[in-house]
Amino acid sequence: MTRVVFPLLILLVAGLFFASLLIGPAGLGLKQAMAALFGRGEGGDAVVMVMRDIRLPRAVLGLAVGAALGLAGAAMQGFLRNPLAEPGLIGVSSTAALGAVIALQTGLAAAFTLALPLAALLGAVLSVLLILLLAGPRGGALTLILAGIALSALAGAGTSLVLNLSPNPFAAAEIVFWMMGSLADRSMTHVWLALPFITLGCAALLTTGRGLDALTLGEDAAQSMGVDLARLRLVIVLGTAAAIGASVAVAGAVGFVGLVVPHLLRPLVGARPSRLLPASALGGAAMILAADIATRLIAPDRDLKLGVLTALVGAPFFLHLIWRMRRVEA
């Protein structure tokens, strides 16, 4: 089954990536779009700008952000051995969002193009430092979860406070819309800012496959097999922070991908995390690309937010998962 699943996922991601390049209000044909992407082609500078400055960054970010969310979700579930775990559990998403919200509220985002993603990345870095400080060098999974929940609550309260005290209704509306998540109006500048962090974070998470495989047998068994649990936790926390922090910085808060994708793929690739990690990266990329395409098709004139669509799909799945776990426990 695994031999079939991976080629199908790769073909699905490739197909959705090219579909993302071709679908949009400009109504460009395949030949015209590809000619504008790789050369000048017909239509002149306007068509080239649509392909290279609008659609290409959007497709690349959809691929990268989706892979980061799916991979981080699988890694967190494997490390915590909890099917309800997701990347935002350690507070990175909330603190990155708080950093971006502060940049929007103070006017830095309007004064400096990269102020918003840089502020979000700074928030993610601070969250990692606080998590490691709170959890300690040898803190277990429970300590990590509790520290993440506390940090998420604190960052959420800070975001609510900024919205509550905002004297400018337009700034408050911009904050709310940004927090819904979107890939629209992103440029190659956003790609070059986020891609190095996402790449490093995903590369770090992919190296944890062997340790997570051993951890499925229990912490004592993993340690007897030579797995350094403290190092494993550090790699997962840093990798998740880099990948998710950069993703939130450029795409806003997009939820449920890291929770849903590993569950959908686990029955197809088996329970071994080393197989689930790359599969979830591909599955996350496919989900975000598909959702972004859907936002353009469902409401092309209303700018339907990406995070809204993923929540509409992910929340019912989350409820179904809880219901199924309740039936198993009963």
Image (cartoon, grey):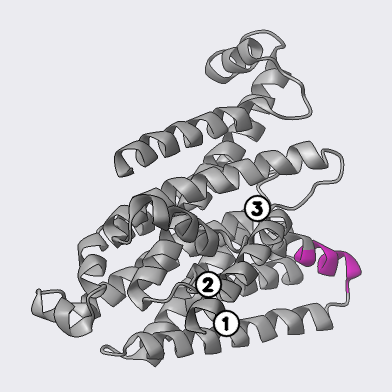
What kind of secondary structure does the magenta stretch mostly adopt? Answer: helix
Q: Which mark is residue 152?
A: 1
Sequence-wise, which precedes: disc 3 or disc 1?
Answer: 3
Q: Nearer the viewer, mark 3 or mark 1?
A: 1
Residue 102's x, y, as percent? 68, 73
Q: Amino acid at mark 2?
A: Gly
Residue 225's x, y, as percent? 10, 74
Mark 2, Cα crowd under 10 Å, few <14 / some 14-19 / many 20+, is many
Sequence-wise, which precedes: disc 2 or disc 1?
Answer: 2
Q: CA distance from mark 3 to mark 2?
A: 26 Å
State yes or no: discs 2 and 1 in contact (Cβ < 8 Å): yes
Residue 237's x, y, as percent? 37, 73
Q: Is the residue 120 above or below the residue 54 in the image?
A: below
Name the residue rendered at 47%, 48% in the picture.
283
* Residue 90 belongs to the span the image colors magenta: no
- Please report the bounds of the magenta region as a residue range: 168-176
Residue at the disc numbered 2: 88
Name the residue rendered at 88%, 64% in the picture.
170
